[in-house]
Image (tube, helix red, strand yellow):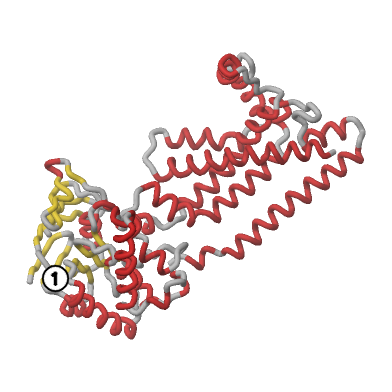
Amino acid sequence: MLSPIILSLKIATIATIFSFVLGVWFAYILNKKRVPGKNIWETVLILPMVLPPSVMGYLLLIAFGKRGLIGGFLLETFDLQIVFTWVGAVIASCVVSLPLMYQNAKSAFISLDPIYEKAAQTLGSSEWKIFRTVIFPLAWPGIISGIVLSFARAIGEFGATLMIAGNIPGKTQTIPTAIYFAVESGNTELANRLVMIMTLFSFVLILGLNAWLKKRNYIGRQG
Amino acid sequence: MYFNIKKTLDHFSVDMEYAFDRGVLVIQGESGAGKTTILNCISGLTIPDEGRISIEDRVVFESAKGTDIPARMRNIGYLFQNYALFPNMTVYQNIVYGIKNKPEYKEKEQREDLLNYADEVMETFGIAHLKKKHPDRISGGEKQRVALSRAIVTKPSLLLLDEPFSALDQQTKETIYQQFDFFKKNFQIPTILITHDARESRMFADVRILIKDGRIIEKN
């Protein structure tokens, strides 16, 4: 029972790190800069949130399969196979959690009063320093919401993961896939335990986030 | 300093030219007259459509030659109408923020001088005791003094003050007026102050221009 839990945590953690970096970067670039085709970029980023997981899984299979554009390149150049490996599960989890990270970071950035950025400019700061010392810290509560929700989404990812990584015990079997196959094979005891762990974990995560955000209460700090 | 600014915005346009050497230039006008647009163009936060801006004989903007020095390199102190103190930093962190961006800050001896000067300014404005507080924990008058200190500790070539007294209640205003008078006499930084208040204009102006609909209508 421990193996899918450890693997789920590992996959979700790595996927969340990538979602965080990409989500924050895209949110900043698309909402603070003039980017050509901004709406198209944004739609592509949010698409995984509305597409059925099977469609996402299939698209990832096409892209990362042995004959896929990216998969073929990785196999030929680095002898790296993505399909039916835990790396494939990381990619699936990252793609489906990215919209949550992006949306939260975007809301956090656009709700910031631009006056702080202007003040930092007149005080001699470079764009990177303004991002690091003013924008990012002020947007932090929104970004942390994105991180927590992305992690929760990544750890619960099932459909796309099953299609690209399969269900190989000890190798690619995560909690959601383990639950599905436990139910399929009539092992309700294992399914019950994993469902309980998953529910409890998600509950504590969301409860903790809400408590932290209330405590932080940045609204009172604007000024 | 000299400015000749032409800027068309959605609802109105600004077309102004003026030069002054020292003291306080007050630009007085009703809201929507183009006061903040002028300050934003001078500071580099807004790019004029046409014109020329020079500070201490250094040209920071000239449309004809394509010169546009970014705001961060103009060495201008700017006090915003709502102060714009960074809420994630303490009063002290706010005040030394600009100092840390100066190239001299990298050298140990000069760094100490710069930080000592920041302490001096804080003492002068009576805000040294607020060092560790966050902006949301101090009063409006204190915020104003912190913002002014933050704008002047970098020893700017020009100071821009955007309606610095408008957010204060009458009683606090009177105290701050006295402090501003002290600042004016002791710091000797060329300053542009914009206000809609005729009394403030009379109190602090060495030179005064009245503006309406983006144009100068009176100089004295």
Question: Residue B150: x and y, percent?
Answer: 32, 66
The residue depicted at 39 percent of the width and 50 percent of the height is A129
User: Which residue sits at x=19%, y=66%?
Assistant: B192
Residue drawn at x 90%, y 30% as measured from the top left:
A185
* Quadrant of the frame with the N terminus of chain B: bottom left
In the image, residue A119 above or below residue A220: above
Residue placed at 70% from the left, 57% from the top? A207
Judging by the rendered image, the residue that carries numbered circle 1 is: B23
- Chain under disc 1: B
In this view of the protein, which residue sits in the foreground, B127 or A139? B127
Callout 1 amino acid: Gly
Please name whichever residue, B167 or B187, is drawn nearer the observer in this view of the structure.
Answer: B187
Residue B159 placement (x, y as % from top left): 22, 65
Residue B200, quarter of the rendered image: bottom left
A161 with respect to B197 (left or right): right
- Give residue B195's position: percent from left, percent from top: 23, 71
